Image (cartoon, helix red, strand yellow):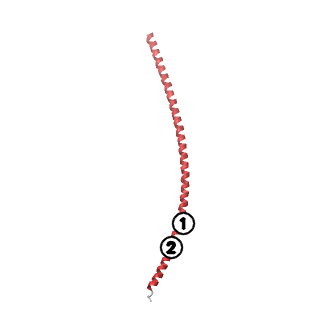
Amino acid sequence: MADWIRELGERVERVEQKVDDLATSVDRRFAEFSEALVEGRRYTEFAFDRLDGRFDALEGRFDGLEGRFGVLEGRFGRLERNLDQFIDVQSRANALVERRLNALESRPQS
């Protein structure tokens, strides 16, 4: 019976050693996993900051383009007003010429 108790004690010690080794392995894996998470977070923050900078630069460029389009819109508005004025003047001139031609045509030929 003493041998049986001694063997049981040795087996318990081996199981205890395996549990200790397993706990050490789990701790090491959790530490590696935690470090990988930290590294992933650092990279994500770096990538986000870089992308955010690019978006800020693009936003500035779009603001500049929007201003330039505003200037062009004003210029087209002025051009449209000038063309409308020109068309009005031409229409009045054409109407005047048409009346004169009609008056000349309606005169008796001498």
Residue farthest front in this picture: 110
Mark 2 residue crowding within 10 angstroms, few (<14) / some (14–19) / many (20+): few
At 53% from the left edge and 32% from the top edge, which residue is drawn?
35
The secondary element bearing badge 2 is classed as helix
Residue 91: % across, % down = 49, 75
Which percent across, then down, holds residue 4? 43, 12
Q: Nearer the viewer, residue 73 or 8?
A: 73
- Could you tell me the amino acid type at mark 1? Arg
Which mark sits nearer the N-terminus, 1 or 2?
Answer: 1
Tell me: 6 left or right of 57.
Answer: left
- Using a 10 Å C-alpha cutoff, classify the residue at mark 1 as few (fewer than 14 neighbours), some (14 to 19) or many (20 or more): few
Vertical order, 67 against 93 (above or below): above
Measured as percent of width and height from the top left, residue 27 is found at: 51, 27
Instruction: Locate the C terminus by quadrant.
Output: bottom left
CA gap between label 1 and label 2 equals 15 Å
- Say what secondary structure mark 1 lies in: helix
As displayed, is residue 1 above or below residue 46? above
Amino acid type of the residue tagged 2 in the rendering: Asp
Residue at 54%, 43% (x, y): give it: 50
Q: Are marks 1 and 2 in contact (CB under 8 Å)?
A: no
- Where residue 74 sits, quadrant-wise, is bottom right
Residue occupying image coordinates x 45% and y 13%: 7
Q: Which residue is mark 1?
A: 78
Toward the viewer: 53 or 9?
Answer: 53
Residue 88, label in figure: 2
Query: Where's the N terminus, which quadrant?
Result: top left
> Which one is in front, 25 or 64?
64
> Quick check: 98 above or below 82?
below
Residue 70: percent from left, percent from top: 54, 59
What residue is rendered at 53% in x and 66% in y?
Answer: 79
